[in-house]
Amino acid sequence: MENEFLPLPAVLAHYGGISQSTVYQLIKDGRFPRPIHIGRSSLWSAQALAEHEVILAAAVSGGPIPDGVEK
């Protein structure tokens, strides 16, 4: 399965319209996946974002992080 990469506007829309500055602050704080850069474009791995959501859900519920999901 190929990994899909999402541009910043798609990431912002996926997370309920959070701001660009919020995303980059979360990255700086180590609380959001880092993008890859191709030219001047920042792209996020859909797989990394999905894993991030699993980690967030586990943190909110107090449950363990499932095997195979990287922190």
Image (cartoon, grey):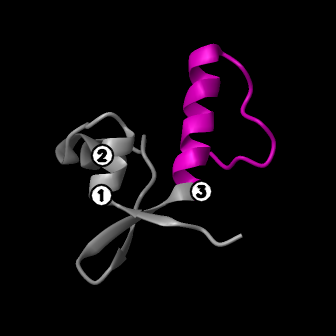
The residue beneath circle 3 is: 47
Give the residue furthest to the bottom: 39
Q: Residue at x 30, y 46 (%)?
A: 12
Q: Which residues are magenta?
A: 47-71
Relative to 68, 28 lies left or right: left
Label 1 with label 2: CB-CB less than 8 Å: yes
Q: Can residue 44 be seen in this snapshot?
A: yes
Q: Residue at x 26, y 37 (%)?
A: 17
Location of the C terminus by quadrant is top right
Q: Disc number at residue 25?
A: none
How busy is the neighbourhood of tag 2: few (under 14 within 10 Å), some, or many (20 plus)? some
Q: Residue at x 26, y 49 (%)?
A: 24
At mark 2, the secondary structure is helix
Mark closest to the chain's N terminus, 3 or 2: 2
Q: Can residue 29 be seen in this snapshot?
A: no
Q: Disc number at residue 12?
A: 2
